[in-house]
Amino acid sequence: MSHVTTHVLDAALGVPARDVPVLLEAAVDDARTRWEPVAKGRTDEDGRVPGLGPDRLATGFYRVVFDTAAYFEASGRHGFYPEVTVVFHLADESAHYHVPLLLSPFAYSTYRGS
């Protein structure tokens, strides 16, 4: 299983968000001014990205970038946030990190899932 997983739900429609482009990046420097891609994918019919990134990552800062503009445009809707970027600190190399996103055209929320 990937060290980092995600799940996107469309809270406005009450369904999983299909086909959302997702990018996982790692911070290159401690100031988090430069990032390098680790993995990318698209959400499946259940709103998940199977195999997002490697099984193990080193401690450090990472971010998951969700291309919400592409998702909303594909369904003929317009969203206020063209992308959602969630930065997090991976502090425990042995723990699983789940970064879910609850999405609507004018709001979003995230939390550390299990």
Image: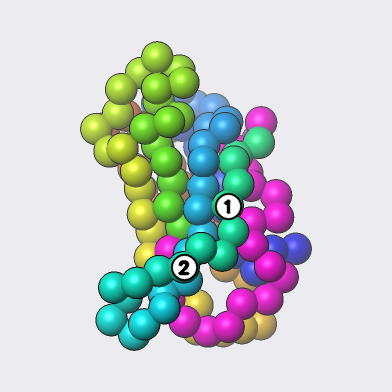
Residue at 66% from the left image edge and 31% from the top image edge: 45
Can residue 27 be seen from the camera position used here?
yes
Residue at 57% from the left image edge and 31% from the top image edge: 18
Residue 27, disc? none
Mark 2 neighbour density, 10 Å: few (under 14) some (14–19) many (20 or more) = few
Which quadrant would the N terminus be assigned to in this image? Answer: bottom right
Q: Nearer the viewer, residue 6 or 69?
A: 69
Residue 36, disc? 2
Q: Is residue 100 above or below residue 15?
A: below
- Give the residue at the far top of this rendering: 76
Q: Dot 1 corresponds to which residue?
A: 40
Q: What residue range appears in magenta?
A: 45-63
Rendered image quadrant of residue 93: bottom right
Residue 89 x %, y %: 43, 76
Q: Is residue 77 left or right of residue 42?
A: left
Q: Is residue 75 above or below residue 81?
A: above
Query: For the stretch drawn in magenta, what is the main secondary structure?
Result: loop
Residue 65 x %, y %: 43, 52
Q: Nearer the viewer, residue 99 or 53?
A: 53
Disc 2 marks a residue whose amino acid type is Glu
Q: Is residue 30 left or right of residue 24?
A: left
Residue 105 x %, y %: 32, 29
